Image: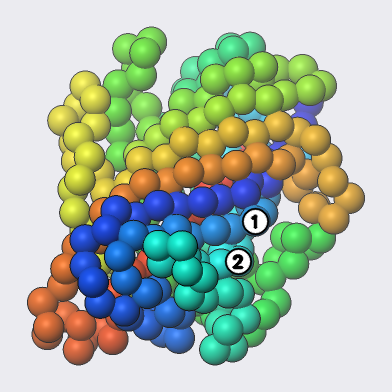
Amino acid sequence: MNKSIALAVVIYISPVVAIATTIDGIEIGSGSFSFVATTVMGRVNNINNNSTKYVGDVLGGVGRVTEIFSESDSVWQNGVNNRELTFVFDNYVASYVSSTVIEYTGGSVKFYNDDTADSNYRTGTGFADGTVWLDLSSTSFVSDLGHVVSLVSTGTLLGTKIAGTNVGLLSVTGFGAADTFFDTNAFIAYGTNYTADWDFTSSFSNRAAPSFVYGTVGTTNLNGVQTVPEPSSLALFGIALVGFGLAYKRN
C-alpha cells in the first residue's frame, strides 16, 4: 500500500526575548512564536502515495511555511519581502512495523530561504532551493516498546486507510543560518539522556487530494525555545528566530 503525508504545521517557540528580528528577509517579531505551514507532503521510498509497510522503508517529504505569528500578531506571510520559506525532511528509516505502531531511526529536516516562489505541491519540486535557514537532525529516545528510536507513529497504520499520530525529537546541527538561536538543549530524551532542541507531535491520514502529488494530510506541533544570542552573533547573522514543520517518506 502507498502512503504519503501532507501536514499542516504549527510551531510554538517559548517566549524568551523581547526583540524583533528579521532573518534574511523573514520577520520573526518578539515574545512567543508560532510558525504555520498549511501543508506538508510526505511519501515513502521516494514513491508518491506510498506508505510504510516494512522494516527499512524510508520516510520523507516537503512543506512550505505560510505564516509566522508573534504572540497573536501575524508578522510574516509567505511572499513578504519576496521570500519563500520551505523545508524538506528525509531519511527516517522504519525499524519496527506493526498495524498499530511504526518506529523509525535517523531522520533530518532542512529549512530553505529562497527569493523565488517556485515550490509546487502538484509536482513536489522547488522545496530544496535557496539557502539553508534551519538545519535539524533527529535525536534518539527510548520508545514505549523499549527500542531506541527517533520517531514513533501510532494508530491504524497498515491497510488502504491509515491514520495516526507521530512523536519525535530534533536538534540543530549548527549549519543553518538560524541554528544558533535554537541551540538550547531544552529537552532531555527519555531513556538516552541525550538533549534536544525541539520536540514535535503530529497527526496524519491518507485522505488523498488531487492538488498534492504525495497525497496524505495531517497536522503537526513542534515545540522549542529560542536562545538569546550575544550582540556579536546578531551582527554576524543579522537574524534571531525561526520556525518549522514536518512530514513523511518511506524507503
Tally the marks.
2
Question: To which quarter of the image does residue 67 belong?
Answer: bottom right
Residue 224 locus on image (x, y percent)? 31, 50
| Relative height, residue 202 to residue 42 (above, below) | above
Residue 46 locus on image (x, y percent)? 68, 46
Residue 246 locus on image (x, y percent)? 53, 48
Pointers 1 and 2 in contact (C-beta within 8 Å): yes
In front: 31, or 117? 31
Looking at the image, which residue sits at the far right? 210
| Relative height, residue 180 to residue 222 (above, below) | below
Q: Which residue is mark 2?
A: 66
Three-letter code, disc 1: Thr
- Looking at the rendered structure, the secondary structure element under dot 2 is loop
In front: 30, or 109? 30
Asked if residue 61 lies left or right of residue 151, the reply is right
Quadrant including the N terminus? top right
Question: To which quarter of the image does residue 160 belong?
Answer: top right
At 45% across and 80% down in the image, what residue appears? 26
User: Which mark is first along the chain, 2 or 1?
Assistant: 1
Label 2 packing within 10 angstroms: few (<14), some (14-19), many (20+): some
Three-letter code, disc 2: Thr
Q: Which residue is mark 1?
A: 38
